[in-house]
Amino acid sequence: MHYEVDRLFLSGIDDLKEKSDFLNFHTDVIVQMKNGEKFVAAFFTFKRVDEILRENAKTGERLAGKYFWERNMLLVESCEPAFIQLVVEDLIEEGEFKDVFERI
């Protein structure tokens, strides 16, 4: 199936104080297609996951930071909106979009 992206919605972006925060961030990404369909996935930066694992090691959560998961999760270098757009376009182009994103 061919997908054409209309809009991207990223949670929490307005809360960022500095551009460097895009390297240590996570966001839910909602992709709205031109046909009106919507899909969601959770984007986490590598740095953010590392920070979460260290926090969990201290609190004991998730076997003291021995594992981490999130539904429909994708690990990325940055959560900068333009980069996320590139990732979404690449997933569509490679035919992997529906492997990562869940229809809502």
Image (spheres, helix red, strand yellow):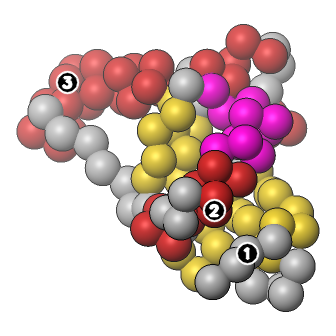
Left or right: 88 with respect to 6?
Answer: left
* Residue at horizontal 52 percent and vertical 33 percent from the top: 76
Span of residues in magenta:
78-87
Q: Earlier in the sequence, mark 1 or mark 2?
A: 1
* Location of residue 58 (image quadrant): top left
Q: Is residue 25 left or right of residue 66?
A: right
Gap in angstroms between the C-alphas marked 1 and 3:
41 Å
The residue located at (81%, 14%) in the rendering is 18
Mark 1 crowdedness (10 Å alpha carbons): few <14, some 14-19, many ≥20: some
Quarter of the rendering occupied by the C terminus: bottom right
Which callout, 3 or 2, points to the residue nearer the camera?
2
Q: Nearer the viewer, mark 1 or mark 3?
A: 1
Element under label 3?
A: helix
Residue 60 seen by the camera: no
> Which label is found at residue 3?
1
| Residue type, numbered disc 1 | Tyr
Magenta span contains residue 54: no
Percent coordinates x, y for residue 83 in the rendering: 73, 34
Instruction: Give the amino acid at mark 3.
Output: Ala
Helix, strand or loop at label 2? It is helix
User: Rounded to the nearest whole Å, what is the CA distance between mark 1 and mark 2?
Assistant: 7 Å
- Residue beneath disc 2: 92
Residue that numbered label 3 is attached to: 57
Q: Is residue 73 above or below residue 31?
A: above
Q: Residue at x 55, y 57 (%)?
A: 94
Q: Is residue 86 left or right of residue 27?
A: right
Among numbered discs 1 and 3, the one appearing first in the sequence: 1
